[in-house]
Image (tube, grey):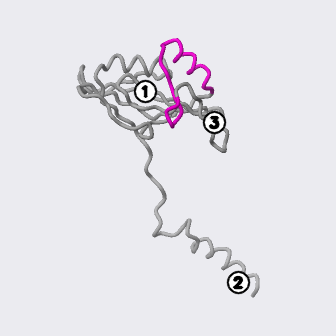
Amino acid sequence: MLLRTSLYAALLFPLATPALAQDKPAPVARLDHVAIWVVDQQKSIDFYREMFGLGEIPAPFPAGGPRWMRFANGIELHIQPGRTAPVEQPRRVHMAIGVASLDPILAKLKARGQGWSDVAGKPGAIQNMRTDGIRQIFLQDPDGYWIEVNDAGKL
């Protein structure tokens, strides 16, 4: 009798757990792409290629339409032409790009004569306040979109 009760419990208990409950669907969404609207599409393509090594991939649009690039983890960056007004957004509205080391990025920024800051806006500062030891900088792309670059890729 004890064996039968234990067997029933072992078979039925997992069906009552929240992980297997029918009313809680498993997450099925994933980030597919990020799109930015730019003034000079080629300048943006060159920036993301040179700074972060993104490669361009075929886009299903006629020439002159959006162009697509891909990050190492498969997320796409869609660069759409036609912007005429400047981008106006605070630093806290940004995309984040993880790299293995900030040093090559800092060297590229210095070579370009382009500045960076911490999240508070202190020029040339490298933010090092995360409890996991990840360092961060913030910079702007050619259209003024904010980008956090962090060394989370080293983990």
Mark 2: give few (<14), some (14-19) or many (20+) Cα within 10 Å. Answer: few
- Give coordinates of residue 125: x percent, y percent: 57, 28
Q: Sequence-wise, which precedes: disc 1 or disc 3?
A: 3
Q: Quadrant of residue 89?
A: top left
Residue 128 is marked as: 3
Disc 1: which residue: 140
- In the picture of the structure, the residue carrying the numbered disc 2 is 5
* Mark nearer the viewer, 2 or 1: 1
Is 89 rendered above or below residue 56?
Answer: below
- Residue 111: in magenta span: yes
What residue lies at 63% left-to-right and 36% top-to-bottom? 128
- Residue segment shown in magenta: 101-122
> Is residue 120 magenta-colored?
yes
Q: Nearer the viewer, residue 55 or 12?
A: 55
Percent across and percent down for residue 10 are 68, 74
Please report the residue visible at 51 percent of the width from the left and 18 percent of the height from the top. Answer: 109
**Farthest top residue in view:** 111
Q: Which quadrant does the N terminus fall into? A: bottom right
Q: Quadrant of residue 105?
A: top right
User: Residue 74: x, y in percent?
Assistant: 47, 33
Q: Secondary structure at mark 1?
A: strand
Q: What amino acid does circle 3 point to?
A: Asn
Q: Which image quarter: residue 66?
A: top left
Neighbour tally class for label 1: few under 14, some 14-19, many 20 plus, Cα within 10 Å: some
Q: Report the amino acid beneath label 2.
A: Thr
Q: Toward the viewer: 20 or 30? A: 30
Checking the image for residue 124, the label placed there is none
Of badges 3 and 2, the one in the foreground is: 3
**In the rendered view of the protein, which quadrant contains the C terminus?**
top right
